[in-house]
Amino acid sequence: MSWPTRKHWWYAWQRNKQSILWVFQRPTSLLPRPLSTWPTAPKSNALYEAYSRVQEDVQKTRNDPVPLWIRNAPTQLMKDLDYGKDYKYAHDYYKDMQIDDPERPPAVQVQEYLPESLKGRRYYEPGHQGKEASIKKWLEKRRGEEV
């Protein structure tokens, strides 16, 4: 059986028909807005570049140990080996902090979660356009840089 067969197309239609029909049954006066907004929205490849850097580091450091404080400790032996010891649950700390931007958590980093070999590594570097500008400002504050 080769892909795609009529059967596959039929299943794809059944799974997605509600969404497809919703889009095409809208009054035509509603369609020009998203069709003109999406292509003209600010574009960025920052996420793609970050993903590429992450993949490189995964390949280089895949055997590095996970920090003890973020390891799960379901058994007594693991607890005795200090798995999960001194773990700081960010939500417990954030609920008492002042929130500057309701779309993001406070810019205070509660704990380091990367292995020692990746400590301080930066992956996502947002640009200056669109929403990335506010994300950049938040990241600079989180990283302790001048805003």
Image: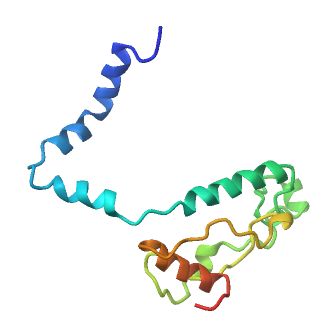
Q: Where is residue 2 in the image (x, y as percent from the top left)?
A: 47, 11
Residue 84 figure quarter: bottom right
Out of 79 and 128, give the one closest to the viewer. 128
Q: Position of residue 22 (x, y in %)?
A: 19, 43
Q: How is the image coloured?
A: rainbow
Report if residue 87 is visible in the image: yes
Out of 93 and 139, give the one closest to the viewer. 139
Q: Residue at x 51, y 76 (%)?
A: 135
Q: In this view, does 88 lie to the left or right of 41?
A: right
Out of 24 and 82, give the one closest to the viewer. 24
Q: Residue at x 83, y 53 (%)?
A: 61
Report if residue 104 is visible in the image: no
Is 116 above or below relative to 140? above
Is 73 above or below relative to 9? below
Total number of numbered discs in the rendering: 0
Q: Is residue 106 left or right of residue 67?
A: left
Residue 36 figure quarter: bottom left
Q: Which residue is drawn at 74% across and 67% down?
A: 113
Q: Which residue is drawn at 16% across and 41% down?
A: 24
Q: Where is residue 65 in the image (x, y as percent from the top left)?
A: 86, 56
